[in-house]
């Protein structure tokens, strides 16, 4: 997977030692990288969007559908699909997002990468428990955080991941959602990385 190779290249360029932070599916990339990369000393993940039970609607053919939308050049439809079906943004908010052309065009610019996200995440978004022992190879300390105002399925994913990692701790950030406020997140991240 190229995402892991990209992170490894940055680690090696930085002197072969690093602490990793990943938010959303970036958290899965950070964990996968830590599992196979010497020199990773800590990992902090925020709301890795695993679907580990029936607490949210499952996605049907996430990778295939998003790949087809990219191939067909339907980037507006792709962004809307990702926001509502994958990220869980209420459909009534999408119209307002489209009104902000800078934000919407920014999302459309990165929309062709969504099938890569789907390929990386699909195996862990099937409404099943995380595979037993899969994360046991991540031996470094991992802080798993979620937002107190996020939906139950993200809390359930965080709890499931904490049970599977051999050296995990948990923290819920009160009042936060998947769109976490950096001013709330940064002090927690700094404290964990400085321990």
Image (cartoon, grey):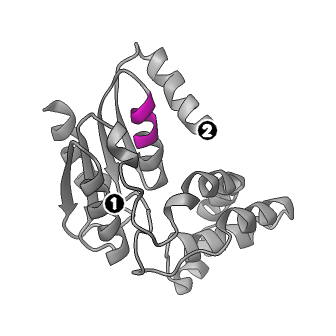
Mark toward the start of the polypeptide (1 vs 2): 2
Q: Residues within 10 Å of mark 2 (few under 14, many from 20)?
A: few
Q: Where's residue 2, x and y in %?
A: 62, 35
Q: Which residue ends up furthest to the right in the rendered image?
A: 72
Q: Which residue ends up furthest to the top in the rendered image?
A: 15
Give the answer, above or below, for where 166 lies relative to 52.
Answer: above
- Res 87 visible: yes
**Which residue shows up at 86% across the image and 64% down it?**
72
Per the rendering, the mark at residue 1 is 2
Q: Which residue ends up furthest to the bottom in the rendered image?
A: 92
Q: Quadrant of the N terminus?
A: top right
Front residue of this view, candidates 158 and 129: 129
Q: Where's residue 39, x and y in %?
A: 35, 21
- Res 151 visible: no
Could you say which quadrant of the image residue 59 lies in? bottom right
* SS state under label 2: loop
**Which residue shows up at 63% across the image and 59% down it?**
107
Q: Is residue 56 left or right of residue 85?
A: left
Measured Cα–Cα span from mark 1 to mark 2: 27 Å
Front residue of this view, candidates 33 and 164: 164
Q: Is residue 176 left or right of residue 171?
A: right
**Which residue shows up at 80% across the image and 67% down it?**
74
Q: Residues within 10 Å of mark 1 (few under 14, many from 20)?
A: some
Majority secondary structure of the magenta segment? helix
Q: Where's residue 62, x and y in %?
A: 65, 67
* SS state under label 1: loop
Per the rendering, the mark at residue 180 is 1
Give the answer, above or below, for where 130 lies relative to 149.
Answer: above
Bounds of the magenta span? 31-36
Front residue of this view, candidates 123 and 115: 123
Q: Where's residue 61, x and y in %?
A: 68, 70
């Amino acid at each position: 997977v190229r995402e892991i190779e990209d992170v490894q290249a940055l680690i090696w360029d930085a002197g072969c030692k690093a602490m990793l932070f990943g938010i959303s599916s970036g958290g899965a990339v950070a964990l996968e990288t830590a599992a196979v990369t010497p020199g990773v000393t800590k990992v902090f993940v925020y709301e890795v969007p695993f679907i580990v039970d029936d607490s949210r609607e499952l996605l049907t053919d996430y990778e295939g559908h998003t790949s087809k939308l990219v191939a067909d050049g339907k980037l507006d439809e792709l962004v809307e699909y990702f926001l509502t079906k994958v990220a869980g943004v209420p459909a009534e908010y999408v119209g307002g997002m489209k009104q902000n052309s800078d934000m919407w065009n920014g999302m459309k610019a990165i929309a062709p990468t969504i099938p890569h996200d789907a390929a990386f995440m699909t195996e862990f978004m099937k409404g099943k428990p995380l595979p037993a022992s899969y994360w046991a190879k991540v031996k470094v300390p991992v802080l798993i955080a979620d937002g107190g105002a996020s939906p139950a399925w993200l809390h359930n994913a965080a709890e499931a991941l904490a049970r599977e990692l051999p050296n995990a701790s948990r923290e819920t950030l009160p009042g936060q959602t998947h769109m976490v406020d950096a001013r709330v997140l940064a002090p927690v991240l700094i404290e964990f990385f400085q321990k």
